[in-house]
Amino acid sequence: MKNMKKILLSIVSLLLVAFLAACGGKDTGGALSEDKLVIGVTAGPHEQVMEKVKEVAAKDGLEIDIKVFTEYVMPNTALAEGELDVNSFQTKPFLDNVVKERNYDLVDIAPTLTFPMGIYSEKFASVDELEEGAKLGLPNDPTNGGRALILFQSAGLITLKDGVGDQATVKDIVDNPKNFEFIELEASQLPRQLDELAGAAINTNFAIEHGYVPTEDSIFIEGSDSPWVNLLVVRGENKEDPVLEKLLKAYHSDEVKQFIEETFSGSVIPSW
């Protein structure tokens, strides 16, 4: 009987420890710290720019802890769940789609960068050279997929149904003169799969990460007037927190703008 009591006490103790541990995660409620932010970015240019922002912000007493992601799903999940205070990697259409699908309370607070999407090819030097029935890759998420289709249309490769805008899918192609086959892949995988495709529409951050120089290596690219501006995003409850003013002051500084212009030579555009 004594042994049984000891076993029961041990089980209760373990359950109590587990409960306390489960309650020890980061609370998603409440104000942000006044002097430290945890910011999520995607690898590549967003990471490089945020490292510069971190350097500038430190002069104003703001510490930035950068968390790097290699895809587009987890930065919003991590922000919504309180593992991040801010993220920097997405456009307004992408954010709106995530908020609608997952019911996250996330809002944008400021513009950051524009990454002109380009069409890349290991086999052809011009979109005019693409052959009948060629396989073209594009991102498989709704926002970037629609953007890629608009890019293909701008390049004269297809025609989309009137009025579909950035909600376009491959089902909205109404004219495909060369009978291109469209292969939808996760955005970060497109550079790695490019040698198996005739061409692909690739987001600039992933193109740069793979070693491409968008203004030199793409065979067609969005113009400098691209409306696809990236954003700083926070939880709705924190959008008025004073610490964010320090972040914006650092990010929108002349020092950061100069860094972007000198580092990326027009492939990444400061958009404030």
Image (cartoon, rainbow, N blue to C red):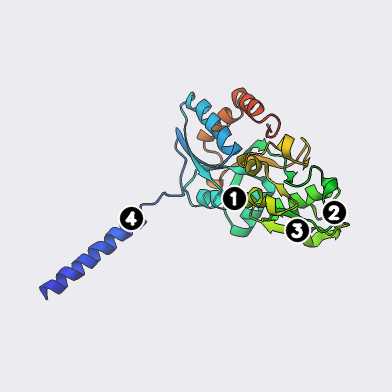
Question: Counting residues from the N terminus, which is met first, the one under dot 3 or under dot 1?
Answer: 1
Q: Are marks 3 and 2 in contact (CB under 8 Å)?
A: no
- Find residue 203 and report its horizontal and vertical position in percent: 68, 45
Query: How many angstroms separate mark 3 from mark 2 (CA)?
Result: 11 Å
Mark 3 burial class by Cα count in 10 Å: few <14, some 14-19, many 20+: some
Query: Which residue lies at the image location 50% right of the left edge and 34% below the top edge?
Result: 243
Foreground pick, 240 / 125: 125
**Residue behind mark 2:** 158
- Find residue 173 and report its horizontal and vertical position in percent: 83, 59
Query: How many angstroms separate mark 3 from mark 1 (CA)?
Result: 21 Å
Q: Which mark is residue 72?
A: 1
In the depicted structure, whether residue 83 falls above or below residue 103: above
Q: Nearer the viewer, mark 3 or mark 4?
A: 3
**Residue behind mark 3:** 182
- Find residue 160 and report its horizontal and vertical position in percent: 84, 55
Query: How many angstroms separate mark 2 from mark 1 (CA)?
Result: 27 Å
Question: Counting residues from the N terminus, which is met first, the one under dot 3 or under dot 4?
Answer: 4
- Point out the image quarter for the N terminus: bottom left
Q: Secondary structure at mark 4?
A: helix
Q: Quadrant of residue 47?
A: top right
Q: Which mark is residue 21?
A: 4
The reply to whether residue 143 is visible in this rendering is no
Q: Nearer the viewer, mark 2 or mark 1?
A: 2
